[in-house]
Image: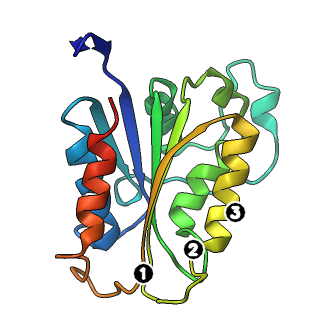
Amino acid sequence: MKFSGQKMNKIVVLIGSMRKGGNTDLLARAFAEGAGKSNEVEIISVADYKVNPCIGCNSCFTREDKSCFQNDNMAAIYDKLRTADIAVIASPVYFYGISAELKAIIDRLHNPMRNEFRIKKLALLLVGAATLPNLFEPIKLQYQMILDFFHLENIGTVLVGGVKEKGDIMGNAALKEAYDLGFSIK
């Protein structure tokens, strides 16, 4: 399918919040709404998948099909990421890091199967309750290291502090910022 003479991007948005309709979910969906105007967007919410943490056994490196021995929903996520051009990481910030559920998915990307992915661009959406000036710095450092290691292009970040209770993000300019970031992807 063509759009404005260009191939549509396939974008996978990884939502790291277990709270459906929460602030992170709303921010990610604003991004997806904007991106969906010119792209194919699929949302993967950790609330819908059971993914065990990586145990570092490296058996995926010796298995013929590079699969993980764990029988959980990560195989479905690998399939979705394998066909994506762009990935978006959206997470609440818990104790200066991303959610444990999202971290489990990211850690499970320590798998040679990732070499089959065609992802070339990455975006980061973060929501935190605190208003500390350096709240997002630890995650931004890890994000930059991922960009550098995998030679990915950063297409943008939306970082929102001071939103704690479900719905606090409503009316926040960050929703439009996320929408606009998504809309800018052609």
* Label 2 with label 1: CB-CB less than 8 Å: yes
Q: Residue at x 31, y 45 (%)?
A: 182
Q: Does residue 65 show up?
A: yes
Residue 115 placement (x, y as % from top left): 68, 25
Residue 170 placement (x, y as % from top left): 18, 76
Q: In this figure, which residue is indicated by the disc labeled 3?
A: 141
- In three-dimensional space, the C-alpha distance between marks 2 and 1, rounded to whole angstroms, equals 9 Å
Q: Residue at x 25, y 53 (%)?
A: 179
Residue 79 placement (x, y as % from top left): 47, 28
Q: Answer with the quarter of the image where residue 65 lies.
A: top right
Local SS, label 2: loop
Local SS, label 3: helix
Along the line of sight, the residue nearer the viewer: 125 or 47: 125
Residue 93 vertical position relative to residue 74 in the rendered view, above or below: below
- Check the picture and name the quadrant holding the C terminus: top left
Please report whichever mark, 1 or 3, sits nearer to the chain's N-terminal start.
3
- Mark 3 surroundings within 10 Å by alpha-carbon count, few (fewer than 14), some (14 through 19), many (20 or more): few
The type of residue carrying mark 1 is: Gly
Q: In this figure, which residue is indicated by the disc labeled 2?
A: 136
Along the line of sight, the residue nearer the viewer: 172 or 118: 172
Q: In this figure, which residue is indicated by the disc labeled 1?
A: 161
The type of residue carrying mark 3 is: Leu
Marker disc for residue 64: none
Q: Residue at x 74, y 33 (%)?
A: 60
Q: Residue at x 22, y 45 (%)?
A: 34
- Name the side, left or right, on which 19 lies relative to 105: left
Q: Does residue 26 show up?
A: no
- Name the side, left or right, on which 2 lies relative to 58: left
